Image (spheres, rainbow, N blue to C red):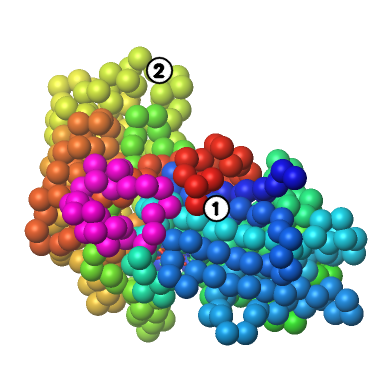
Amino acid sequence: MTLSHTIASAPGKVLLTGGYLVLEQQFQGLVVGTSARFYTIITPSDEPGIQVRSPQFDGGNWHYTLTVQPDFQLTPSSGTSRNPFVEASLRFTLALVREKVGRSAFGVLSTDCIITILGDNDFYSQQAQLEKLGLDSSYGSLAGLPPFADTMTSLKDVHKTGLGSSAALTTSLVAALCAHFKAVDLDNQKDRTLVHNLAQFVHCFAQGKVGSGFDVSAAVWGSHRYRRFNPQVLASIMDQQVDGTLLLKHLSADSFGWDNEVAPFKLPPGFDLILADIDAGSHTPTLVGKVLAWRKANPTTANALWVELGSYNSKVEQVLRDLTTAEQKEPVLYKAVIEKCSRHKASEWASLPETNEVISKMVQLVHNFGHVRRLLREMSQLSEVPIEPIEQTQLLEACLEVEGTVIAGVPGAGGYDAIFCIVLSDKAKQQVRQVWQGWSALSVGPLLSKADSKGVTLVELADVPGLANSL
Ligand SMILES: Nc1ncnc2c1ncn2[C@@H]1O[C@H](COP(=O)(O)OP(=O)(O)O)[C@@H](O)[C@H]1O
Ligand SMILES: C[C@@](O)(CCOP(=O)(O)OP(=O)(O)O)CC(=O)O
C-alpha cells in the first residue's frame, strides 16, 4: 500500500514596522514572510489514535484519542506532557471539519494517523548542534547543518529566534488537517479565509489571549500590510466547549465581524532582507505589558507619539511601494540606481552628484526609516522599556556604515532579541554578516532566512529537502 501524505507548510514572519501600534485597529503593520517555514505531515496509520511527533525535540511526542459518538471528544493520553497549540489545533479543527464536511467526514478517511511537525532550523537557536560539531556560529556553519536538526533540548527550554514558531506551527497544522479531510481547497479564497480565521482562533485559545494576530496572518497570507481584526470577533467563542456548529458559524469567510485587512506587499526588487538573532533573550510579553501600561498612564503623550509613528510607518511603506512601481516603469534607471547606491553608504546617497526620482525615493526611505527608529527610541525612553536599547542602536549604526545597507532595525516588539537589515548587494550581505561576527558587545548569530512572500501552501514530500528523512 502506498501511503498518501498530506503536507501543509506555513512561513515565519518579521514585523518591519508597526510593533505595538498593530495591537490597535487604528494602525497597521508591515509584515514580511520568511523562507523559514513549518511543515505538518499527516500520514494515515494502522495504529489507533492520533500520534503527534516533533522529532527535533526531547519529549516531542503526544498521543490523542478521538471519539465521535455519542459526543465529539478529543482526549490527550494520560502520562504525556501537554502541548496547548497542538491540542487546540486538533480539537477545534477536527470539530469544524466534521461540521463542514458532514458527519461522514471521518467515515471515509480514518482519523488514525501520525502527524509529524518540522520547523526550519532558523526558528530555533542551533548553538548546541554547532558546538557539538565543533563549528562556530557563522552563516557558513549554519548553512552546513542538516535540515530540521535535532535541537538537543525540549520545547520548554529551546531558545527561539523570534520568527513566530507557534503561529507557523498552528497554521500548518490547521491547514494540513483541513486539507487532509477535504474540508478546504487552499486555492479557494473563502476556504483560505476560513483557515486563517480558524488558525487565529486556535492560536488565541492556546496562548490564552487575543493578540494582534499579525503572526498568524503572515503564516496564512505571506508578506502584507496588516490591520488587525476586532478582538470581539473571537471573544464570544473563546471556550473549550465551543462546538463545530458555532465554530463554523463564527469562523467562515462570510461570517459577520471579521474586519481585518490584508494588503499585498513585497520588498522592491534588489532589496534583500537578512536577519540576526541576538542571544540576550528579552521576553516579548513583558516588554508589551510595560509599554501598554505606560501608554495607559500617559494617554496624551502616547497618542501623539503613536499617531506620528503610524504616519512615518505609512511613509516607509509608501516609498517602498513607489520603488516597486519605479522598477516596473523604468527598469534600466532603477537598476542603475540600486547599483550606484550599493557602492555608497546610505548616509551619502543624498549628496550623490546624480539626481533622479529613484535616488530621491531611496533618500526618502532612509530618512523616513531613521525617523521611525527615533520615535521607537523615544517610546523606549518614555516607557523605560528597552525597545531599541543603546547596545542595539550601536550595532544597527555599524550595519548602516556598510555600503549598500538601506535599513537596519529591530523587528516586532524590539528588545535585545533580534535585528534585521535590508541590503542591496551580495557584497553588502557578506560585509554586514562580518560586522555581526566581529561584534563583541552582543552575541549576534546570523539566520539563514530570506524574505519570501508566499503564505500557507500544500507541498509534496519530494519538494522539500530533508522532509522525507525526518519521517
Ligand atoms: N516544532 C514544534 N512542535 C510542536 N510544538 C511547537 C513546535 N514549535 C513551537 N511549538 C509550540 O509553540 C510554543 C511556543 O510558542 P511561543 O512561546 O508563543 O513562541 P513563538 O513566539 O515562537 O510563537 C511551544 O511551547 C509549543 O507549544
Ligand atoms: C509588540 C507587538 O506588536 C509585536 C510583537 O512582535 P514580535 O515579532 O516581537 O513578537 P513575538 O513573536 O511574540 O516575539 C505585539 C503583537 O502585535 O502581538
Describe the element under mark 2 as helix, strand or loop.
loop
Q: Disc 1 and disc 2: Cα gap in Å? A: 48 Å
Q: Quadrant of the N terminus?
A: top right
- In front: mark 1 or mark 2? 1
Q: Which mark is residue 330?
A: 2
What residue is rendered at 34% in x and 34% in y?
271
Q: Please determine whether, in this image, residue 334 is positioned above or below residue 159.
A: above
Question: Residue 179 in the image: x percent, y percent?
Answer: 72, 51
Callout 1 amino acid: Leu
Q: Amino acid at mark 2?
A: Glu
Residue 60: give x, y in percent of width and height.
Answer: 50, 69
In the image, farthest residue toward the top: 332
Residue 136 location (% of width, % of height):
18, 52
What residue appears at the point 43 percent right and 70 percent down from the top-left corner? Answer: 58
Q: Residue 135: where, in percent of width, then height?
A: 19, 51
Q: Nearer the viewer, residue 461 or 304?
A: 461
**Label 2 within 8 A of ligand 2 by Cβ:** no
Which sits in the foreground, 436 or 63? Answer: 63
How many numbered marks, from 0 up?
2
Point 39% across, 54% down: residue: 149
Query: What residue range appears in magenta?
Result: 125-151
User: Upstream in the sequence, badge 1 or badge 2?
Assistant: 2
- Is residue 445 something one can see in this rendering? no
* The label number, if any, that marks residue 471 in the structure image: 1
Alpha-carbon neighbours of circle 2 within 10 Å: few (<14), some, or many (≥20)? few
Assess whether residue 308 is covered by the magenta stretch. no
Q: From what the image shows, is residue 431 above or below residue 254?
A: above
**Is disc 1 placed on a helix, strand or loop?**
loop
